[in-house]
Image: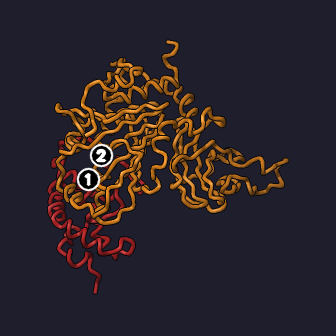
Amino acid sequence: MAEAALPEAFADLAPWLDWALEPERARTAKKVASSMEEINAFYDAVMPRMEEIIAYLDGVPAEERPAPAHRLYLLTLSLVEVANLAEVYKRREVIEACDPLHFNPQR
Amino acid sequence: MKTVMREKQWAEKYPALGTGPVPTEPYFSDEHYALERDLIFRRTWINVGRVDDVPEPGDFIVREIAICKVSVLVMRGSDGVVRCFHNVCSHRGNTLVLDERGSCPGSVYCHFHNWVYSDTGQLIRVPDEENFFDLDKAEHGLTPIKSDIWEGFVFVHLDPEPAETLREYLGGVAEQLDGCPFHEMPLMQTYLVDERANWKVGLDAQNELYHLPFQHRRILGDSFMMNDSGHCRFQDVNLYNYHTVWSCEYDPTHKPTPLEAMLFAAEDGVPLIRYPQMIGEFDFFVIFPNFVILLFEVGNAVSYVSYNFWPLAVDRTIWEIRMHFKEPVSSRERFRQEYFKCLIRDTLQEDTVAHENVHAGLASGAKPHVILQDDEAPIRYFHKVLEDHVGFYRNA
């Protein structure tokens, strides 16, 4: 049987697996390439699950995270990546900042 | 609240600082840039990283002090000692190490003719050595660069006989921050930002809070302590021999975003760590000329961000931003750190645009001076120290 992509309790988040990215620059690139509608839909799907996700990940030692738990972790990092856009700016037009990819993360 | 909202308090604390305008020419003058190279970057202690960048024997990093055309090889030897060398082969002057970082346990070799150096800098092997004339390998090791370490930060001085030790140079900054456990806050991320701006434009822009409720009104608008009119005030400003620190408090009435509220709701029963070295909740140390240590509280922990502003040309700078957080003890803490990292990063992305726009305005020559208010006093002091070094206006 094929390994589940996400831990069983989070199987319903499978439509958002393409946000399970590393390193940071890949998450930023995904944010930059996504429409506000896509970002809001992703945020709305994952944000209500944050307490559950944190409790689940706390039960798995970070060094030994199996692949499904690691994907859940990366997907949650993407939630944090888009949070300022979804919660604060809300519209890209109001942002007076450089292209996020102009910041070159080294890891 | 420790912050005093009174106006013009820093001019009272430091009357010698003056209150007049500051000239703009140092931001765009080629002549001034050449003086900075010779009288600042070749004559002061320059931070090139941390000992943690080279944790194991044989680990190295290469740092470019581009304004001086110097490539610094920072290498931990087999004996555990961190040393700095010119990254130049003794044979024909080739650049020795081409990677920005790596590990070369035991030895490094030049790609041109395979001259081999030990990780402590001695020349240990020369191919076809018998065909050279009176070559004494002991005399042709790597050229050392004067270096010293304070609290894990590695500094170099391009003058082989510095007028001051690193300790003397750091002065009151070292006294304030001695013992601060920087080693407990490992590097989480480094950003390199290529800016079309003079290195001092970015540094000055970061060196005040006045712009926060305006430029960063959306992302940080209510984060720091403000007076009734909505203007930020420092909790304290301290001027040292060449350096400054300003400190401030967070605004307790700050309205958290949903994610922020969720991540900060439970503090996991971990007690608040406060370091006695901290002055406020957010301390911004500018270590002359181009290094910044920003210590701040995040939830129940302390983190720090460092900046190195690396001049490439009078109108071009690499802004190196490093973010350090302690090892998280829970997933919530890990995501809290990620939240803060993204918050700071996104804020600084607003700053980058401003740095370039400010530079363009200054370089037009339209304005002979910039005008500073009292809560921009650290910028005023920076320019005083700058002029003390270069003497651009001394004989004018």
To which residue does mark 1 refer?
A: A32
Q: Where is residue B94 in the image (x, y as percent from the top left)?
A: 65, 47
Give residue B371's quadrant in the image.
Answer: top left
Q: Where is residue B264 in the image (x, y as percent from the top left)?
A: 23, 57
- Which chain does the orange colour mark? B
Mark 2 vs 1, N-terminal side: 1
Left or right, B306 with respect to B208, comes to right
Q: Which amino acid does label 2 sit on?
A: Asp
Chain bearing tag 2 is: A
Residue drawn at point x = 42 percent, y = 54 percent = A106
For the residues labelled 2 and 1, say whether their Cβ atoms are less than 8 Å apart.
yes
Left or right, B103 with respect to A60, comes to right
**In front: B366, or B179?**
B179
Question: Alpha carbon of mark 2 to alpha carbon of mark 1: how far?
Answer: 8 Å
Q: Where is residue B87 in the image (x, y as percent from the top left)?
A: 62, 47
Label of residue A58 in the image: none
Colour convention of the picture: by chain
Q: Position of residue B49 (x, y in %)?
A: 51, 48
Determine the colour of chain A. red
**Mark 2 surroundings within 10 Å by alpha-carbon count, few (fewer than 14), some (14 through 19), many (20 or more):** few
Q: Are marks 2 and 1 on the same chain?
A: yes
To which residue does mark 2 refer?
A: A99
Q: Which amino acid does label 1 sit on?
A: Val
**Mark 1 surroundings within 10 Å by alpha-carbon count, few (fewer than 14), some (14 through 19), many (20 or more):** some
Left or right, B318 with respect to B132, comes to left
Chain bearing tag 1 is: A
In which quadrant is the N terminus of chain B drawn? top left
